[in-house]
Image (tube, helix red, strand yellow):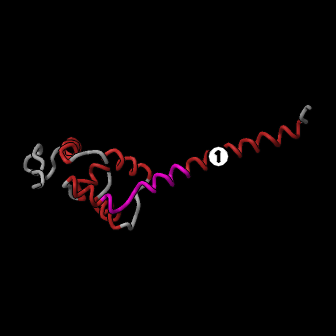
Amino acid sequence: MAQSKSTRRTRRPLEQQIEDLERKVRQLEERRASKRAFAPYWLRRHRAKLRLSAEDYGTLIGVSAITIYNWEKGKTSPRDRQLRALHDIRQLGWREAWERLDAVDGGRGRPDARAAPAPPAS
Protein backbone atom coordinates (compact mmCIF):
# COMPACT_ATOMS: atom_id res chain seq x y z
CA MET A 1 0.00 0.00 0.00
CA ALA A 2 1.58 3.24 -1.14
CA GLN A 3 1.61 6.29 1.07
CA SER A 4 0.49 9.59 -0.29
CA LYS A 5 2.85 12.56 -0.30
CA SER A 6 0.83 14.37 2.33
CA THR A 7 1.01 11.35 4.66
CA ARG A 8 4.78 11.14 4.29
CA ARG A 9 5.11 14.89 4.88
CA THR A 10 3.22 14.70 8.17
CA ARG A 11 4.75 11.40 9.29
CA ARG A 12 8.41 12.47 9.15
CA PRO A 13 8.03 15.45 11.50
CA LEU A 14 6.05 13.28 13.91
CA GLU A 15 8.76 10.62 13.89
CA GLN A 16 11.35 13.32 14.56
CA GLN A 17 9.29 14.63 17.48
CA ILE A 18 9.07 11.12 18.93
CA GLU A 19 12.85 10.71 18.68
CA ASP A 20 13.40 14.09 20.35
CA LEU A 21 11.01 13.25 23.18
CA GLU A 22 12.62 9.84 23.72
CA ARG A 23 16.04 11.51 23.92
CA LYS A 24 14.74 14.03 26.46
CA VAL A 25 13.21 11.26 28.57
CA ARG A 26 16.56 9.42 28.62
CA GLN A 27 18.35 12.61 29.67
CA LEU A 28 15.84 13.27 32.45
CA GLU A 29 16.10 9.69 33.70
CA GLU A 30 19.90 9.96 33.80
CA ARG A 31 19.70 13.28 35.63
CA ARG A 32 17.18 11.91 38.13
CA ALA A 33 19.33 8.83 38.76
CA SER A 34 22.41 10.97 39.36
CA LYS A 35 20.54 13.23 41.79
CA ARG A 36 19.66 10.20 43.90
CA ALA A 37 23.35 9.38 44.17
CA PHE A 38 24.04 12.53 46.21
CA ALA A 39 23.42 12.68 49.94
CA PRO A 40 24.58 15.61 52.11
CA TYR A 41 25.50 13.36 55.04
CA TRP A 42 27.75 11.30 52.77
CA LEU A 43 29.64 14.40 51.67
CA ARG A 44 30.26 15.45 55.28
CA ARG A 45 31.54 11.98 56.22
CA HIS A 46 33.73 11.71 53.14
CA ARG A 47 35.33 15.12 53.70
CA ALA A 48 36.02 14.19 57.34
CA LYS A 49 37.49 10.85 56.25
CA LEU A 50 39.87 12.63 53.88
CA ARG A 51 40.72 15.21 56.58
CA LEU A 52 40.17 18.09 54.19
CA SER A 53 38.85 21.56 54.79
CA ALA A 54 35.85 22.67 52.78
CA GLU A 55 38.18 24.86 50.73
CA ASP A 56 40.52 21.96 49.89
CA TYR A 57 37.64 19.59 49.15
CA GLY A 58 36.12 22.24 46.90
CA THR A 59 39.44 22.65 45.10
CA LEU A 60 39.41 18.93 44.26
CA ILE A 61 35.91 19.23 42.81
CA GLY A 62 36.23 22.69 41.31
CA VAL A 63 33.83 24.64 43.55
CA SER A 64 34.10 27.09 46.45
CA ALA A 65 34.12 26.28 50.17
CA ILE A 66 30.70 27.95 50.52
CA THR A 67 29.31 25.56 47.92
CA ILE A 68 30.64 22.59 49.90
CA TYR A 69 29.00 23.93 53.08
CA ASN A 70 25.69 24.44 51.26
CA TRP A 71 25.79 20.89 49.88
CA GLU A 72 26.56 19.49 53.33
CA LYS A 73 23.63 21.39 54.83
CA GLY A 74 21.33 20.30 52.01
CA LYS A 75 20.64 23.89 50.96
CA THR A 76 21.78 23.21 47.39
CA SER A 77 22.64 20.18 45.27
CA PRO A 78 25.53 19.61 42.89
CA ARG A 79 25.02 19.91 39.16
CA ASP A 80 25.74 17.03 36.80
CA ARG A 81 29.35 18.07 36.15
CA GLN A 82 29.96 18.42 39.86
CA LEU A 83 28.34 15.06 40.57
CA ARG A 84 30.77 13.47 38.14
CA ALA A 85 33.67 15.14 39.96
CA LEU A 86 32.31 13.87 43.29
CA HIS A 87 32.05 10.40 41.82
CA ASP A 88 35.66 10.60 40.64
CA ILE A 89 37.00 11.31 44.13
CA ARG A 90 34.61 8.96 45.89
CA GLN A 91 37.09 6.06 46.01
CA LEU A 92 40.11 8.13 47.05
CA GLY A 93 41.83 7.51 50.33
CA TRP A 94 43.27 10.43 52.27
CA ARG A 95 46.79 10.00 50.84
CA GLU A 96 45.54 10.00 47.26
CA ALA A 97 43.30 12.99 47.97
CA TRP A 98 46.19 14.99 49.42
CA GLU A 99 48.46 14.03 46.51
CA ARG A 100 45.80 15.11 44.02
CA LEU A 101 45.23 18.34 45.93
CA ASP A 102 48.96 19.08 45.93
CA ALA A 103 49.04 18.48 42.18
CA VAL A 104 46.12 20.86 41.68
CA ASP A 105 47.11 23.73 43.94
CA GLY A 106 50.82 23.14 44.51
CA GLY A 107 50.50 22.73 48.26
CA ARG A 108 49.16 26.25 48.73
CA GLY A 109 48.92 27.18 52.38
CA ARG A 110 50.64 24.10 53.77
CA PRO A 111 54.19 24.26 55.15
CA ASP A 112 55.23 20.99 53.48
CA ALA A 113 53.24 20.27 50.31
CA ARG A 114 54.17 16.59 50.43
CA ALA A 115 53.20 16.06 54.05
CA ALA A 116 49.68 14.78 54.58
CA PRO A 117 48.17 14.78 58.04
CA ALA A 118 48.93 11.89 60.36
CA PRO A 119 46.46 9.02 60.23
CA PRO A 120 43.92 8.88 63.06
CA ALA A 121 44.77 6.79 66.09
CA SER A 122 43.07 3.41 65.93
2 part of magenta stretch: no
For label 1, count other residues whose C-alpha is less than 10 Å away and answer few (under 14), some (14-19) or many (20+).
Answer: few
Q: Which residue was labeled with disc 1?
A: 22
* Residue lying at 34% horizontally and 44% vertically, measured from the top left: 88
41 part of magenta stretch: yes
**Image quarter hosting the N terminus:** top right
Spot occupied by residue 80 in the image (x, y as percentages of width and height): 44, 51
* Residue lying at 38% horizontally and 60% vertically, measured from the top left: 39
* Residue lying at 10% horizontally and 46% vertically, measured from the top left: 115
Q: Outermost residue toward the front?
A: 122
Q: How many marks?
A: 1
Q: Is residue 112 left or right of residue 79?
A: left
Using the rendered view, name the quadrant where residue 36 is placed.
bottom left
- Against 1, residue 64 (above or below) is below
Spot occupied by residue 66 in the image (x, y as percentages of width and height): 30, 63
Q: Is residue 97 left or right of residue 17?
A: left
Q: Outermost residue toward the left?
A: 111
**Image quarter hosting the C terminus:** bottom left
- The overriding secondary structure of the stretch rendered in magenta is helix
User: Which element carries disc 1, helix, strand or loop?
Assistant: helix
Spot occupied by residue 82 in the image (x, y as percentages of width and height): 38, 51
* Residue lying at 87% horizontally and 40% vertically, measured from the top left: 7
Residue numbers of the magenta segment: 29-43
Spot occupied by residue 34 in the image (x, y as percentages of width and height): 46, 52
- Front-most of 103 and 18? 18
Q: Is residue 54 left or right of residue 15?
A: left
Q: Amino acid at mark 1?
A: Glu
Q: Outermost residue toward the top?
A: 2
